[in-house]
Amino acid sequence: MSATSESEIGTARIHQEEILEAAALCFMERGYNASSIDDVARRLGSTKGRIYHHYRSKADLFADVYRYGMELNAAAIKPLCRAYDDPVEKLKAMAKVHCLTMLRTRPFQRCVWEGVSLLMRGATTPEQRETLVELQGLRESYAIRFREVIEGAKESGKADFESSGIATQIFLMALNSPIFWYSPRDTDDDEQLDEIASRCTRFALQGLGIGKEYLQDV
Amino acid sequence: MSATSESEIGTARIHQEEILEAAALCFMERGYNASSIDDVARRLGSTKGRIYHHYRSKADLFADVYRYGMELNAAAIKPLCRAYDDPVEKLKAMAKVHCLTMLRTRPFQRCVWEGVSLLMRGATTPEQRETLVELQGLRESYAIRFREVIEGAKESGKADFESSGIATQIFLMALNSPIFWYSPRDTDDDEQLDEIASRCTRFALQGLGIGKEYLQDV
DNA sequence: GCTTGAGCATACTACCGGGTATGTTGTCAA
DNA sequence: TTGACAACATACCCGGTAGTATGCTCAAGC
């Protein structure tokens, strides 16, 4: 609320990132409602006081985890936005990167998933509503970026589906799916993640009706 | 616990089905942890007493909702198990029916989804563990049925993927996806559900690498 | 008509967890 | 040196909720 310089915001973020990570892990494992603030604090090796010093409420903390997760997503596909002419090539790159981001930041992505839907029914105060609408907007504008490219692929004749809205939904769902069924191996093998992302990406692109001849290098 | 005749079990089920439905709706809207027993009772126009007369705990109630949802799934695909020679034709039928069941029994399927994973971390008593393992088994054996047919489709040369395990996961995820992004219209149009199920099914089958020439009638 | 038990409702307890109020410590600026 | 404030820890409050104990009613069986 007070006038804080950007450096102050920066250091605050550094302090908070540790909290964010612990919160994301807790929320992923037990869900938002089943995770207590004390749980998050225990994971940090500290107490409630630390969390409530940085966040005004549990919902605020969750919102920040959500926001951070969406920032990671947006940052990952940002370099690709202007780098391709062919929409299919662009879609391939975006899908692969998106899926890799899912795998690499799984706890946050699980929070994004649980996300707004649950909070909508619980949140009561007007400011909370406002925050949720904002977060919802982040998610939707992200999905729209994919939808536009998907529609471009259809117009190029290389994809084949009926409703772009539905197609986008299933497409993203296929790419998101590993955050649920993939449990990371002890050997944190980056190649293995790449392998999984490739398979999800191929599945999703083929689901859109894109021929295998375009998917050799995925 | 006492020796109950089958008819007694039958009438008990009838009484309980009303509770099951209310519980499924509550759990779908707010999630398991955020739904109180009183919420479920309110939706029934009754009180806690009724629920605790039939169920020993909240977890028990949820388990029954889960079980019921899985029974619906199993019953839906059961007639198809011996009706096809071509694995692709069988898979088409199973996928379509599965997706339609998702759409028609959405509240229960959302509970199945939230399902065991969350409870695993919360459930403490040994008997609860036992129940969860049983429910987990229901889900897995159901998935295995799909996996076998999917593998059959690959062996027939009409499908093309690398890991049948991963392929099955993404495949089912694509078919399950409408329980999240589809919100039923006021006009409870059965044809519309069929339309959506068709699109999901085509997406999922194409994702497996099955050619469009096999998917005209989906 | 009396008992018995199923099928609930009512009233109550115990505890957990979100939130707050206050104390403590280190650091930095004046 | 001291005041001020950030960054926590400690101690406490209190509302909500799972679960229980008990009361009520009605229908069936004898």
Image (cartoon, coloured by chain):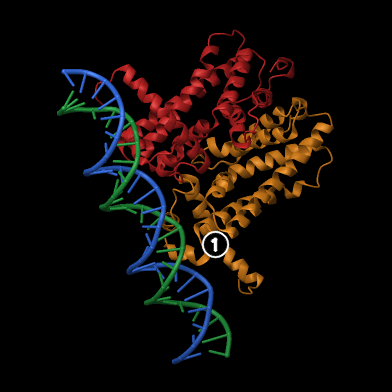
Chain colours: A red, B orange, C blue, D green
Residue A203 visible, this orientation? no
The three-letter amino acid code for the residue at tag 1 is: Gln
Picture residue at 51% right of the left edge, 24% below the top: A143
Judging depth in this view, the residue of D22 and B49 nearest the camera is D22
Quadrant in the picture for the C terminus of chain A: top right
Residue B8 point in image, percent of width and height? 61, 71
Quadrant in the picture for the N terminus of chain A: top left
Judging depth in this view, the residue of A92 and A160 nearest the camera is A92
Compared to residue B18, the image places residue B216 above or below, namely above
Residue A48 visible, this orientation? yes
Judging depth in this view, the residue of A11 and B137 nearest the camera is A11
Q: How many marks?
A: 1
Compared to residue B37, the image places residue B189 above or below, namely above
Residue B200 point in image, percent of width and height? 64, 33
Corner quadrant of residue B37: bottom left
Picture residue at 53% right of the left edge, 56% below the top: B59
Picture residue at 73% right of the left edge, 16% below the top: A216
Q: Secondary structure at mark 1?
A: helix
Mark 1 = which residue?
Answer: B16
Q: Is residue B203 left or right of residue A112?
A: right
